[in-house]
Amino acid sequence: MTLYTVESSPHLRAPDDIRTVMWDVVLALIPAFIAAAVFFGWYSLLLTAVSVFVAVVTEAVIQKLRRVPVTVSDGSAVVTGILLAFVIPPFSPIYVAAVGAFFAIAIVKHCFGGLGNNIWNPALGGRAFLHFAYPVVFNAGSWPVLKEARMLLGRIGLGAPDAVTQATPLKVIKSVATEAAAGDHADLVTRVLAGDHLSVWGEPMHLPSLLHMFLGNTPGCIGEVSGLALVLGGLFLLLRKRIKWQVPVLYVGTVFALTAVLPMAPGLGWLPGVKVGLYHVVAGGLLLGAIFMATDMVTSPITVKGQVIFAVGCGVLTALIRLFGGYPEGVCFSILLMNTAVPMIDRYTQPRVFGVT
């Protein structure tokens, strides 16, 4: 009698490989790349090009040194380079993009064995390193929105045709909420949400409209400002079945729900509001992180149940950091922390093999 060994799933074979998946991600990032060019000018494109170039060269050199096949054509290093550039400020020095890309590939990716073995998302690992290595760049008080983009939006009635430098929306929310809590001035929150121009600690504070923020006419990192561009890229990945809806929807939904009902700062009291939650959705790197980074196949859980836990965990951590932490943003650190928990999540959510108790 012939015996056949049947192992656990998956058994289906498909024509997709790493190369097709990664280049689909690159295509999905094109709308955000175009938005970066419109809102921040040619310099943002140069930063992205430098980041991609250093990432690809670092990957090739390390693979040569490791005496393994050079696989830069699979697009994984290109994706890391683009995403790393997308999470740095548009006024960063060129060397910041280069250092971040090198760290992401050499340390975060290849120190753990290369693609498929890394614990953390390489682009976010590089971003976290840059955050502490160059704090002046990443914690600047004023960020630019360039004249070219505002002139374009001014022609269709959505902006004034002049250049501005201002605090990022998340910093505005954080600063106003902290000041309101310290001085018992809850009206400051109402005023800033209504679009008033305020002065907090000697700095001008103003929130753009939700429409402006969704389109991208707001300060922020290179690839995170246009929610519209990011959503279009996410829909493309969903149609191509490169990501599942559970992670981005539950991640964004958790952040929205918590920021809409929790106090905006310690001691401020309960000021729930849908508008506050919507600002937290379109501000900062939430959409970029939820669509393109939390869905990374290597550093996210493999089961649907695990992905649900992962997404909700990312959302809870992001909301807690934004509301009660020392930084106005929390996407990078929340995803990295949940990346660390992925092996444990996979262990306790893996399906039971048939016939094994």
Image (cartoon, rainbow, N blue to C red):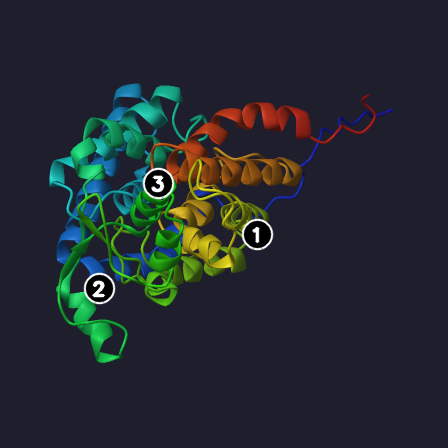
* Rendered position, 256 above or below 353: below
Tell me the residue at 22%/38% (across/down). Answer: 138
Identify residue for label 1. 245
What is the residue that sits farthest to the front in this orientation?
184
Gap between marks 1 and 2, in whole Å? 29 Å
The N terminus is located in which quarter? Answer: top right
Residue 160 versus residue 141 in the image, above or below? below
Q: Quadrant of the C terminus?
A: top right
| Residue at the image point whose x is 38% and y is 41% from the top | 181
Residues 98 and 21: in front is: 98
Residue 329, horizontal then vertical, whole percent: 36, 40
SS of the residue under disc 3: helix
Q: Is residue 136 visible?
A: yes
Q: Quadrant of residue 10?
A: top right
The percent coordinates of residue 4 (x first, y second) are: 78, 27
- Work out whether mark 2 precedes mark 3 in sequence or the reverse, and give the earlier one: 2
Is disc 2 surrounded by few (<14), some (14 to 19) or many (20+) residues within 10 Å?
A: some
Name the element at disc 1: loop
- Element carrying mark 2: helix
Q: Are marks 1 and 3 in contact (CB under 8 Å)?
A: no
Q: Mark 3 points at which residue?
A: 178
Query: Where residue 38 is drawn, which disc sits there?
Result: 2
Tell me the amino acid under the disc marked 1. Answer: Trp
Residue in front for this viewpoint, 23 or 44? 44
Q: Name the spot of residue 309 as percent of width and height, x first.
A: 61, 36
